[in-house]
Image: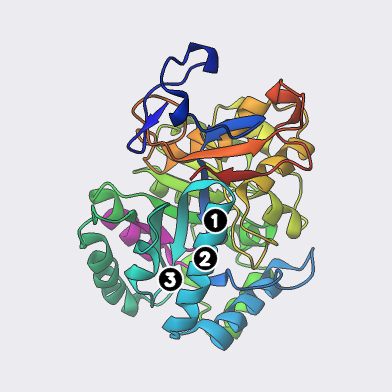
Amino acid sequence: MVKDGTIQSVQPFGDYCGSLSSVRDLGNGAIVPGLINTHTHLEFSDLEQPLGEPGIRFTDWIRLIVKCRNDSHSNVLGTKRSAIQKGLTETISSGVAAVGEIATLPFDIDDYASDRELKQLLFLEQLGSDEKTFLEKRHELDGFLDSPQTLDTNCARHASAHAPYSCHPDLVDQICNQAFSLNRVVAMHLAETREERELLENQTGEFVQLLKDFGVWNPSAFQSRSVLSILNKLSVGRSLVIHGNYLKQHELDFISQQKERMTVVYCPRTHQFFDHEDYPLGQMLERNIRVALGTDSRASNPDLNLFQEMKTISSLFPDLSTTQILQMGTLNGAVAIGLDKQLGTLTPNKSAALSFVAGPPGETHVNDWLFYPSANSSRVH
Ligand SMILES: [Zn+2]
């Protein structure tokens, strides 16, 4: 039962004693908690298809992303606004109740806040290798985080250090210090590719040429630096380790020890797009690491449908239960971004941001059909 946007009770229909006129029959199917898309970049939501062919080298894809930004988005607020709005609409229509968005300047907060059916967690993305710019970046992030957490909108403000190859370690420190002192979440792409590991471990590989081509190669930024040293910084507060495709055993052990604060975000179809090695999901779950899900952007995924990510996991990892997969797409994401008091489960007093998955006629056991190829989810309005 739902009243004023809040779940009152969850019970079999046979136990309901109220008026039938207030019953809404959604048909055969399953009501599930509103899904949580923990990681996306909405500024690319107007792309018709991912950039490059599946299996593209990651550094080549980065070149395409930078070109795409320069060609279409840079400082053009109107273009960016329309992509963000398109992405928000697509996100909601796939049954999502909260989204973790990597926001890049410039943008107008009203581009997001105007949408009220969706909790929007904005992670202001920063990157840089030149120490001279860090003071300016500190003011930029302070200005963003210090703005009041507007109660009249669904937006909350957090921080993102883009990735090890684009962020000097001192900048990562600065971002973590600023965000964690205000109890905000930090998101960072980490251990995404083999080449990123090579850069950190040996200061060699294709990232070196990429950074030289962009005029930002600073070898001192990669000496005495490791994935573990970055995880250490992120573990000081609540953080999202985005991707983690190439995390090693001892790094997974570390995250497992810090699982109160740290969450790994798996983006299944983006992982497939780059033709990475098998995702270490089993090793994460063995260690009770909290794994949440993201679509990433339309630059590496054909759409922003989080339910499709859950179906992809179901087909890639057939030993996982429906409950485990559902939890990754709902409660784990809600805990990761601090919204588990409002979202993530069908529990009295939580928000009635519900989604519905239509089921095949006659089927009753949800485990048998929830992630079938034809299944899809939508928000209950
Ligand atoms: Zn991303």
| Secondary structure type for disc 1 | helix
Closer-to-camera residue (339/8): 8
Image height check: is 6 above or below 131?
Answer: above
Q: How far apart are labels 3 and 1 at the CA level?
A: 18 Å
Query: Which quarter of the picture shows residue 248?
Result: top right
Closer-to-camera residue (178/70): 70
**Disc 3 or 1, which lies upstream in sequence?**
1
Q: Are marks 3 and 1 in contact (CB under 8 Å)?
A: no
Image height check: is 299 above or below 321?
Answer: below
Q: How far apart are labels 2 and 1 at the CA level?
A: 9 Å
* Classed neighbour count for the residue bearing mark 2: other residues with Cα under 10 Å, few (<14), some (14–19), many (≥20): many
| Secondary structure type for disc 3 | loop
Q: Are marks 2 and 1 in contact (CB under 8 Å)?
A: yes
Tell me the kind of residue under disc 2: Leu
Closer-to-camera residue (245/361): 361
**Which residues, given as a range, are shown in magenta?**
157-178
Residue at 27 percent of width and 68 percent of height: 138
Outermost top residue: 15
Closer-to-camera residue (216/7): 7
**Disc 2 or 3, which lies upstream in sequence?**
2
Q: How far apart are labels 2 and 3 at the CA level?
A: 10 Å
| Secondary structure type for disc 2 | helix
Q: Which residue is mark 3?
A: 104
Q: Which residue is mark 2?
A: 42
Q: Which residue is mark 1?
A: 91
Q: Left of 83 or right of it: where is 353?
A: left
Q: Quadrant of ligand 1?
A: bottom right
**Disc 2 or 1, which lies upstream in sequence?**
2
Q: Could you say where residue 78 lies in the image, as x and y percent from the top left?
A: 44, 82
